[in-house]
């Protein structure tokens, strides 16, 4: 592997792809949405090219060193998708007359048909095709997906191609990677629930392939099957929900369904009870995809896939799909804009599932020692925050508290953005740690047998003191952890505070059932501060826990650049977007990002946002806000530093961005919690509160016996009948063959007899 600067020459083939969108934009003949199809088609074309070329030229040195076994081609395709997305967003924010909110652009129509109605008349012509639905939710999630997929692919070029275990199989990885990306892009752009479901299933297939990438490992194969089957449970309910929706509205097109959700087929008033069950079915599908209780068990095991896959699933694509679906359901309950009343219970259910998952996942994260599994449970918990916020939005909108509903909806979607950026960076940073620790271990023990074959480069108990060895990675993980914790002024703070405040506001407004989710997410804030700080201190602070640490260096190309970019976005992006009114934009209260509504100057807007965050007018919410800050910013990190903090080894220094934190962590003293680590509670948390054992027990007593019975029934009854028919037909054929003599005379006689029989039959019928 050459130096980083020498690796950059490999990016030259990307220049023509970078010029495609500017060229089309300068032509001025079409709008940006007319080319939205390129976002999906680019990875669709790249997928077979990478796969087939990799099979043909697998051992070729040019393919391996110049094209990085398909990584460069995947990067080119994702660059087209990203640049097209930026073009659409640019036109949308500038208020282009050709792009309106909830705009539908059809780019492929291939089947036209009429529908036979119950009165035997033909309905209007229907067209089956693909269109693009454009609104603020589409653009936000599309940018998140395309931007992070591009950066993760960049990261994967360094991570995958420098690991000998992946040699000659990376073409398969990059092909499946771009296909996975295609699924997410298509789902977000879809203008109807049918195509959303189709692309949803594409992601499900790719998750199985990528999680089980190391298919020769029993744990990876098991994790892939577990993820596939668990998410399929949710998908069945999703499909049922779509059937009910079609029965209500006679269409699955967003333009039809969202035009007036209170009116169904033929102008009939929509029954809230029937719609409630449709929404519940759709929500269960979202629960499965976003790994929420009780369909959460697949996500921690999904860490068996390569680290870029973990980043892809947790930040860019799969788990965000469920959140996107729930956010898409808002028009059904928004009574201020033709929504159906009487659905506030649906919002409560969503909020409770979110609150339970947030608290449970944070609890389990306390005892995890695998750095990727800490982040996996963090993902579950933070997604649960967003679900709780969406549940609050659903509740407020259904009781016509539309201002509160729009605010918490915008805050929830803003947290999706902040979490995606931070978590993408955190997984790539963890990948950097794992990659460099693994290489250092191999270098240290090369050609010798130290009895250290069980060394786990993902176990934080083998790390410590890496702040001086991996300065960029340590800085990135610090800012990412701060964003997840909700440290004031950093990324996630601006969105998490809004979710917690409005959930408590629902309780203060008289909805007593909101007290449970409100308490759970408030407690989770402090727990997040502990387990995220614990992860950072165990990895980067204190003295090395293994001799391997002394040999770690931050030297692999392609890995550092995405970390630097996402660090900047996480550190200042959240605050910048908050000042520009991103909450109003994401809730569709505003069509653009600007200093609108609150102040006439940048300074005035900054002061307004700070006052709104720290000094809200409602004294109850002010108290909730300060308790949240105290738990997440003070209590959690200090407790983590007392257990896992400490200064670096003598002679080692960290850069100024993280050095202060390492030094500070050593000033709070030490606290021995070994007794707690050996407790039954710790054991229960380590075993994931026995949910996996429970599920396996239920399967062993119900599904597996039923499967065995159906197999016996198929083998002995169905197959038995078929075999009997087969044997009788064989015997009958032998008897018939006796009449096949080969004599023309016999054939003429048989034909004559047959004709006479037909004649007699016809005469009998006519008479």
Image: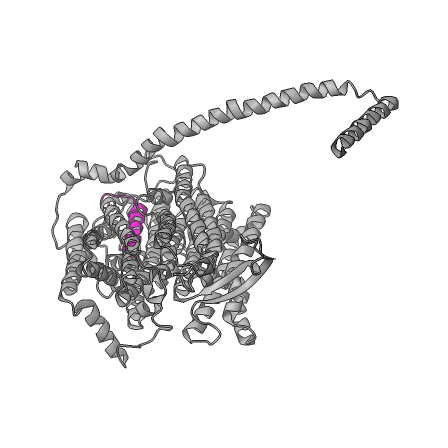
Q: Is residue 112 found inside the magenta-colored segment of the image?
A: no
Q: Residue furthest right?
A: 745
- Residue 592 vs residue 357: left or right? right
Q: Is residue 377 found inside the magenta-colored segment of the image?
A: yes
Of 351 and 52, which appears nearest the observer? 351
Residue depicted at x 33% and y 32%: 698
Of 247 and 130, which appears nearest the observer? 247
Which portion, as a residue range, is magenta? 366-388
Residue 429 in percent (x, y) is at: 33, 54
Residue 202 in percent (x, y) is at: 48, 49
- Residue 223 vs residue 66: left or right? left
Main SS type for the magenta part?
helix
Q: Note whether 752 is above or below 607 in the view shown.
A: above
- Residue 239 vs residue 64: left or right? left
Q: Note whether 381 is above or below 603 in the view shown.
A: above
Residue 532 in percent (x, y) is at: 24, 52
Q: Is residue 693 visible?
A: yes
Residue 618 in percent (x, y) is at: 16, 67
Q: Is residue 474 visible?
A: no
């Amino acid at each position: 592997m050459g130096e980083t600067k020498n690796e950059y020459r490999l990016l030259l083939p990307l220049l023509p792809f970078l010029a495609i969108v500017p060229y089309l934009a300068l032509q001025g003949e079409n709008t940006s949405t007319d080319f939205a199809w390129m976002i999906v088609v680019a990875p669709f074309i790249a997928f077979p090219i990478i796969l087939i070329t990799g099979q043909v030229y697998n051992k070729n040195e040019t393919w391996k060193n110049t094209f990085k076994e398909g990584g460069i081609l995947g990067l080119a395709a994702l660059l087209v998708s990203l640049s097209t997305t930026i073009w659409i967003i640019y036109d949308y924010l500038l208020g282009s007359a050709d792009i309106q909110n909830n705009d539908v652009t059809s780019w492929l129509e291939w089947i036209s048909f009429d529908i036979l109605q119950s009165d035997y008349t033909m309905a209007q012509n229907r067209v089956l095709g693909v269109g693009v639905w454009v609104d603020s939710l589409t653009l936000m999630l599309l940018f998140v997906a395309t931007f992070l997929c591009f950066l993760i692919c960049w990261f994967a070029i360094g991570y995958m191609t420098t690991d000998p275990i992946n040699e000659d199989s990376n073409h398969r990885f990059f092909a499946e990677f771009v296909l996975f990306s295609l699924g997410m892009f298509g789902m977000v752009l879809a203008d109807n629930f049918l195509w959303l479901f189709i692309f949803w299933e594409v992601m499900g297939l790719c998750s199985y392939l990528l999680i089980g990438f190391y298919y020769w490992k029993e744990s990876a194969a098991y994790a892939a099957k577990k993820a596939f089957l668990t998410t399929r449970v949710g998908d069945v309910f999703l499909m049922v929900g779509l059937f009910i929706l079609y029965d209500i509205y006679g269409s699955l097109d967003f333009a039809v369904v969202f035009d007036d959700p209170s009116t169904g087929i033929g102008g009939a008033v929509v029954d809230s009870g029937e719609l409630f069950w449709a929404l519940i079915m759709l929500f269960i599908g979202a629960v499965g995809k976003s790994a929420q209780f009780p369909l959460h068990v697949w996500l921690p095991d999904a860490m068996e896939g390569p680290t870029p896959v973990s980043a892809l699933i947790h930040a860019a694509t799969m788990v965000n799909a469920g959140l996107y679906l729930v956010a898409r359901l808002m028009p059904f309950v928004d009574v201020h804009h033709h929504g159906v009343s009487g659905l506030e219970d649906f919002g409560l259910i969503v909020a409770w599932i979110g609150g339970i998952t947030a608290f449970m996942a944070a609890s389990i994260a306390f005892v995890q020692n695998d750095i990727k599994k800490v982040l996996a449970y963090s993902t579950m918990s933070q997604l649960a925050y967003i679900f709780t916020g969406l549940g609050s939005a659903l509740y407020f909108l259904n009781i016509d508290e539309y201002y509160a509903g729009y605010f918490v909806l915008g805050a929830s979607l803003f947290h999706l953005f902040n979490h995606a950026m931070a978590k993408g960076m955190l997984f790539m940073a963890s990948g950097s740690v794992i990659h460099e620790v693994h290489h250092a271990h191999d270098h240290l023990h090369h050609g010798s047998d130290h009895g250290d074959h069980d060394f786990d480069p993902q176990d934080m108990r083998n790390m410590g003191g890496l702040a001086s060895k991996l300065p960029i990675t340590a800085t990135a993980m610090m800012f990412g952890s701060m964003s997840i914790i909700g440290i004031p002024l950093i990324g996630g703070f601006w969105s998490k505070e809004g979710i917690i405040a409005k959930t408590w506001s629902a309780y203060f407004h008289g909805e007593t059932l909101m007290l449970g989710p409100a308490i759970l997410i408030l407690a989770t804030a402090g727990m997040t501060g502990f387990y995220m700080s614990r992860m950072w201190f165990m990895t980067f602070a204190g003295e090395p826990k293994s001799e391997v640490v002394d040999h770690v260096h931050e030297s692999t190309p392609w890995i550092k650049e995405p970390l630097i970019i996402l660090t900047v976005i996480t550190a200042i992006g959240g605050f910048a977007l908050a000042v520009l009114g991103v909450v109003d934009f994401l809730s569709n209260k505003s069509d653009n990002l600007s200093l609108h509504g609150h102040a006439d100057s940048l300074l005035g807007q900054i002061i307004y946002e700070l006052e709104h965050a720290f000094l809200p007018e409602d004294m109850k919410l002010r108290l909730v806000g300060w308790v949240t800050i105290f738990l997440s910013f003070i209590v959690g990190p200090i407790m983590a530093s007392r257990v896992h903090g400490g200064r670096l080894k003598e002679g080692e220094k960290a850069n100024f961005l993280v050095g202060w934190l390492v030094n500070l962590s050593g000033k709070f003293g030490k606290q021995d919690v070994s007794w707690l680590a050996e407790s039954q509670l710790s054991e229960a948390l380590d075993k994931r509160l026995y949910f996996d054992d429970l599920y396996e027990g239920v399967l062993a007593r119900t599904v597996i016996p039923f499967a065995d019975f159906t197999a016996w029934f198929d083998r002995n009854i169905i197959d038995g009948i078929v075999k009997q028919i087969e044997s009788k037909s064989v015997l009958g054929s032998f008897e018939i063959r006796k009449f096949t003599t080969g004599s023309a005379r016999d054939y003429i006689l048989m034909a004559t007899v047959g004709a006479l029989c037909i004649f007699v039959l016809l005469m009998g019928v006519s008479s």
